[in-house]
Image (cartoon, helix red, strand yellow):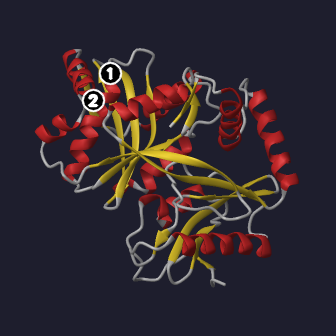
Amino acid sequence: MIDVRITQVLPANTFKLPIFATVEYLKLKATNNNFGYFFNDKFALPYFIGKHLWIKRLKFTEAIISIKGEEENISSQKMFLNEVINLIDKEKIADIVAHPMAQCLFKTVPDKSEFIEWGSYVLNLESIKTEQEVIKFFPKKFRGAIRKAIKDGVTVSETNDVNTVHKLINDTFKRSKSPYSPSYDFLIKIKNEIRDNSKFYLAKKGNVAVGSLVVLFNEQGASALYSGVANRSFNCQNLIYFELFMDLIRLNVKKLDLGGARLVYRKDSKFAGIQLFKKGMGAELKKGYTFTYDRSKIKNKIFYIIVRLYLFLKGKKFEGASLKQTNKLINEYKSSQDPDIVVL
C-alpha cells in the first residue's frame, strides 16, 4: 500500500512544476480555494475542485509528476493512482473525477476508471536558437502561410486588450459549436494573477483584429491555452505562432504543448482541421491515456442533465463528454471499419 496524502504546499525539494501544476494556476480554477496535490515520497498529482450546485467535480491539471524529476516505472504510477482514487472515495473528496486537462497524458490509469487513449501535439524547441532556425523548423506549407500573412499586411504583437482577445476566442468557439468557452473574467484573472507567466497575442490587419492566442509558460514548457480567429483570418495563426516561437526561444523555454488531441475522430469533424493545423506546424504527436471516475454515478447523471439544460437555454447542444464520444466512435469503427473514421 502506498501512503498518499493531500497538501497545498509540496516539499521544498520538489522538481520544478509545469505551469498548470503551480499554485497560481490551481487557485484560479478552484472553487473556494479547494485545490492541492495528492502526493507521496515519489509522485505529485495536482488538482482543483469546482463546485456546481452541490456537486463537486475534481480535475487533474497535469499527469503524474515525479517529485525528484526521475522516471518511475508504470506499476508504481498505477499503484499511486489507485490509492488516489481510494482516498477520494474514503474521504468523499469529490463526487466526480472529470476528464483531466487536455494536455495531460497518463502512462497508466486507475483500475476503477473509464479511460481512452489520448494524445497531445508537442513541439521541441531545445535545438532552435535563431530566427532562421525557427523558419527552417516549420514545414514548407506553414512557412508559405507565414510569408503570405506578412505580405497581406498582418502584424502580431502582445497586448493588454483582453476584451478583443476574448471576443475572437468566444466567436471562434461559437462558430465551431463548442459548448464551452473561457469567460472574460477568467482571462482577466490570468492577465492579472499570472502576469509574468502568460502571453496574450493579437494579430491585426490594419486596425482590424483577426486573431488571438493565450499562452501560459514557465521554464518547464509552454502551453497554448486558447486561440481565436476572425471569419477571414489571413493566415494570422501561422504568424502568431512564429512570433510565439521567437519569444519562447528568447525565454529559454524548451517545449510548446499545443493541447490535447483525439486519436479517433471523423474526417469531417472540427477535430480533423484543428489537428491538421497542429501537425502542419511540425509538432510530434505524443500518446498516453486519459480517464474519468464517478464516485457518485447519480450525481454524474444529474450534472450532465444540468449541463444539457444550461446549454439548451443558451441555444447550444451538448454532444456528450469527449471520452464517451471517442468510445462510441471506436465501437463504430470496430463494427463497420467506416473509412470516414480516423484512428491514429
Residue depicted at x 63% and y 80%: 4
**Where's residue 115, x and y in %?**
66, 52
Report crowding for label 2: few under 14, some 14 to 19, many 20 or more residues within 10 A (C-alpha).
Answer: many
Q: Answer whether labels 2 and 1 touch (C-beta < 8 Å).
A: yes
Report crowding for label 1: few under 14, some 14 to 19, many 20 or more residues within 10 A (C-alpha).
Answer: many
- Rounded to the nearest angstrom, the CA distance separating label 2 from label 1 is 7 Å
Image-quadrant location for residue 232: top left
* Side of 118 relative to 328 (left or right): left
108 over 188 or under it: above or below: below
17 over 267 or under it: above or below: below
| SS state under label 2 | helix
Residue depicted at x 81% and y 51%: 300
**Where's residue 306, x and y in %?**
81, 41
* Side of 122 relative to 31 (left or right): left
Query: Which residue is identified by label 1?
Result: 235
| SS state under label 1 | loop
Image-quadrant location for residue 340: top right
Total number of numbered labels?
Answer: 2
* Side of 159 relative to 75 (left or right): left
Three-letter residue code for mark 2: Leu
For the N terminus, the quadrant is: bottom right
